[in-house]
Amino acid sequence: MCLTVSRVFTTKYEALSYPALVAIKDIKVYKVLIGRRILGIPFGNMAPFRKFHYAWRKKYTAEFSKSTSYTSPWTKNAKFNLDIDAGLHAYVDKGLAISNKDKECIVVQMTIPKGSEFYLGSRGDIVSNCLIYK
């Protein structure tokens, strides 16, 4: 999963220098995991893309990995996107998370804690350097 920041930049340097936002309060987000619900309780804790396992009430941290891509490489005045390749990915809207899950997946609520860094994506996604499975 890769997040494209919802802003266009004029140079690669400008894109790669763009700072993360900082959470001024806890942010509720939604993560897609492989699993199912039994009596309303989510069972399953593995991310479908990197097969990473999440444990209940545990705090996870990650470092961002950034790259750039062209918005229109064939034009004379090409612009650049900032792509966040590594980090803790989720969705800001539960409905969007549900619409992006496979049949064997569930959507769980997680929290980006206050003080964490994050980027907002152009597709309703979000990536953070810290995430708690609550």
Image (cartoon, helix red, strand yellow):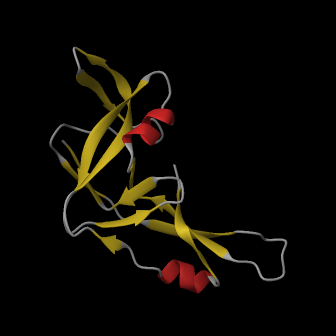
Q: Quadrant of residue 69?
A: bottom right
Residue 36 percent location from the top left of the image: 34, 20
Percent across and percent down for residue 79 are 69, 77
Q: Is residue 76 left or right of residue 57?
A: right
State the image coordinates of residue 107 (x, y, percent, origin top left). Answer: 35, 33
Q: Is residue 73 left or right of residue 95?
A: right
User: Is 106 located above or below residue 65 in the figure?
Assistant: above
- The residue located at (65%, 84%) in the rendering is 10
The quadrant in which the C terminus is found is top left
- Identify the image quadrant of residue 9: bottom right
Residue 58 at least partly seen: yes
Q: Relative to residue 94, is residue 121 depicted above or below?
A: below
Q: Left or right: 68 with respect to 87?
A: right
Task: Judge left or right: residue 22 versus residue 4.
Answer: left
Residue furthest toward the left? 57
The image quarter containing residue 113 is bottom left
Query: How many marks overall?
Result: 0
Residue at (79, 71) in percent of width and height: 73
Residue at (15% x, 42% y) in the render: 57
Residue at the spot x=77%, y=69% of the render? 72
Above or below: residue 78 compared with residue 102: below
Q: Is residue 83 visible?
A: no
Q: Position of residue 34 (x, y in %)?
A: 39, 28
